[in-house]
Image (cartoon, helix red, strand yellow):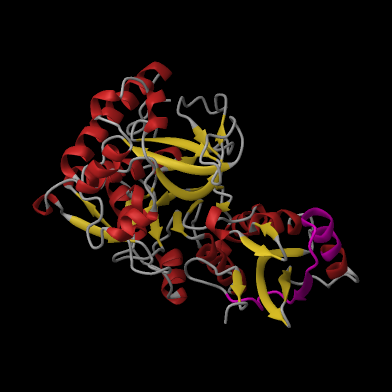
Amino acid sequence: MQYRFIPELTEEETIDLQLNGLRWTIHHASKGCPQYRKKLKEAGVNPEDIKTLKDLQYLPFTTVDDLREGYPFPLLAVSESEVVRVHTSSGTTGKRKVLAYTKKDINIWKTMLARCFELAGLSTLDRVQIAVGYGLWTAGAGFQLGCEHFGAMALPVGPGNLELQLQILTDLKATCLCSTASMALLLAEQVNQHNLKNKIALKKAIFGAEPHTPKMRQYIEDALGLEDSFDIPGLTELYGPGTGLECQAHTGIHYWADIFIIEIIDPNTLKPVEEGQVGEMVVTTLCKEAVPLIRYRTRDLTRLIPGKCACGLNLPRHDKIFGRSDDMFIFRGVNIYPSQLVNILEQFPELSSEYQIQLTRNQGLDQMTLKVEIKKDTKIPEHLSKAIEQQIKSKILVSCKVEILSHGELPRSFGKSKRIIDHRQT
């Protein structure tokens, strides 16, 4: 297949690009950013020391604390006169992380997203309904940039406003939806409720910003009549959405190894995990000007997938984002990731994709309640909650109360759904 935006690189070409990009990044960061210059000096690393990609292991890690300490323009490696735009993180855990962009950064970002649309099999005849946030958040601006650069028609609706979303779907015949999985679920339920499936022209969807389960994806595809859907990763620190995409083989996410390097480490020991094992994703940029990243700890949990993809594309892959290392919660001395509970819920076909974990403390003892929804028009089987509780006890070794709710009882979201409600500190 001939690609317009996706490079077809050999392994040797990729290694050369990465080594040259790594050398450039270390030199650029050391020269332009006092914070990085100090970190590299403390680690005893000079830009000239980088001889092979194995030297990456000697470089210091960068963390979210480095971004917060440098507020409002953290890790800036160019003069402010070269900054043409800023985006920020959501700011849910303190001050927002402000990320600056040069013209080159913007051009690289739009190319990354154009690659995503190409990998999803879109053409310039497609109409892309962008149902994510605009403004300081990266998603809306990023998807629109990439869509226009790719050459498809952008329908920049933004999040929320279900009536307008449905109107655009039916009247302008959007063929591709870009949204969070939670927003896509809301739209799917509305299309189902109003019997609009035969009045819309959606063929594909691209979900980002939050993990979603296979059960949720299947429901969305069925309700919207989709031919296919794709998982898109991304984070504000690394341009935004579009750092890679699932191909149509759905055996992992191809990422742009000519633009950044991925390492997978054990979040506790900070050492590399064995190939194919799950750990924390660490990224190093190769051409990012305004805010280069050197071994940035993303907190996202995933694994690198060895071998070549069945699609034939010679770009490396990582697995879906299973969650975040800081999403882990401790319950009665046991470290628990939400994905562990999701894997158990997937075993019960009567359940929908929606769940919520509530943590409370009663007389000094932690309590966990897992609220799950039954599928629409499904009768709650006797002893279902007890069966789920037994599986949780068997697999995770903790006791948990399970409440079965009717379809639609749990809150829906235009953005990321809040899955963990922790009342233990309130």
Residue 105: name its quadrant.
top left
Residue 390, magenta (yes or no):
yes
Q: Which residues are magenta?
A: 389-411
Image point (56%, 55%), residue name: 211
How many marks on residues? Answer: 0
**Residue 81 % position (x, y):** 8, 53
Q: Is residue 225 left or right of residue 401?
A: left
Q: On the rendered image, what quadrant is the N terminus found in? A: top left
Q: Is residue 106 left or right of residue 3?
A: left
Q: Is residue 392 left or right of residue 356?
A: right
Q: Nearer the viewer, residue 53 or 141?
A: 53
Q: Is residue 235 above or below residue 6?
A: below
**Residue 82 % position (x, y):** 11, 49
**Residue 44 % position (x, y):** 30, 33
**Residue 157 % position (x, y):** 36, 66
Image point (70%, 65%), residue name: 352
Q: In the displayed orientation, state which residue is furthest to the left.
A: 81
Q: Nearer the viewer, residue 378 or 124?
A: 378
Image point (39%, 60%), residue name: 130
Residue 142 in sight from this viewpoint: yes
Q: Is residue 326 left or right of residue 12?
A: right
Residue 207, magenta (yes or no):
no
Residue 46: name its quadrant.
top left
Q: Is residue 12 above or below residue 125?
A: above
Residue 247 in sight from this viewpoint: no
Q: In the displayed orientation, state which residue is furthest to the right.
A: 382
Q: Nearer the viewer, residue 124 or 184?
A: 184
Q: On the rendered image, what quadrant is the C terminus found in? A: bottom right
